[in-house]
Image: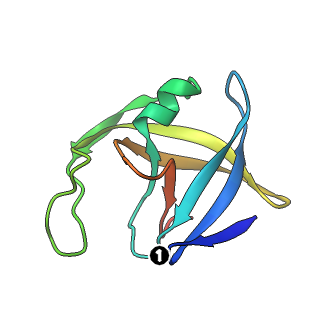
Amino acid sequence: MVDNENNHTMVKIPLQGMKNSTTINAMIDSGATEDFIDQEFCNKYQIRRTKAKNPREIYLADGEPSSMGPVTHIAKVPMDIGAHREITTFQVGKLQIYEAILGIPW
């Protein structure tokens, strides 16, 4: 399902392969160089995270560092979009507003 909310394209995506399957609200951001998932969402749904090989800062389009702080963990989560299923590698961070952001890799 697609929802245009405040000029942002949002999709509801079923996530699989965790203790309890759930649906995540994701914003599609064609300018994001990675896919992101909120740290608190991972905690709430017990999504397994692994330490990133190279922790790094995330920078916004204006060159300023993101307020979410450095990405130190990733989460690999199977997700369904319609009949399509893929394992997505999310960068885990404090997103504050969104549960997930789908960027260029998606």
Q: Which amino acid type is marked by label 1?
A: Ser
Asked whether residue 63 is in view, the answer is yes
Seen from the viewer's position, the closer of residues 106 and 64 is 64
Q: Is residue 51 above or below residue 35?
A: above
Left or right: 44 with respect to 23?
Answer: left
Q: Position of residue 75 (x, y in %)?
A: 49, 37
Graded by Cα atoms within 10 Å as few (under 14), some (14 to 19) or many (20 or more), the crowding at tag 1 reads few
| Mark 1 element type | loop
Circle 1 residue = 30
**Residue situated furthest front in the rendering:** 6
**The one of 95 and 15 positioned closer to us in this rendering:** 95
Quadrant showing the N terminus: bottom right
Question: Residue at point 51% right, 47% down?
Answer: 99
x 86%, y 59%: residue = 83
Number of marks present in the image shown: 1
Horizontal relation, residue 10 to residue 50: left or right? right
Q: Quadrant of the C terminus?
A: bottom right
x%, y% of residue 31? 39, 75
Residue located at (13% from left, 65% from top): 64
- Tell me if I can see residue 48 in this picture: no
Q: In terms of image quadrants, where is residue 52?
A: top left
Q: Which residue lies at the image location 34% right of the left edge and 42% below the top edge?
A: 94
Examine the rendered structure and indicate whether residue 76 appears above or below residue 13. above
In the image, 82 versus 5, the foreground residue is: 5
Q: Position of residue 66 (x, y in %)?
A: 22, 56
Residue that extends furthest to the left in the rendered view of this protein:
64
Query: Residue 103, relative to residue 38: is it above or below?
Result: below
Measured along the vertical axis of the image, is residue 81 above or below residue 79?
Answer: below
Measured as percent of width and height from the top left, residue 56 is found at: 22, 47
Is 53 on the left-hand or right-hand side of 37? left
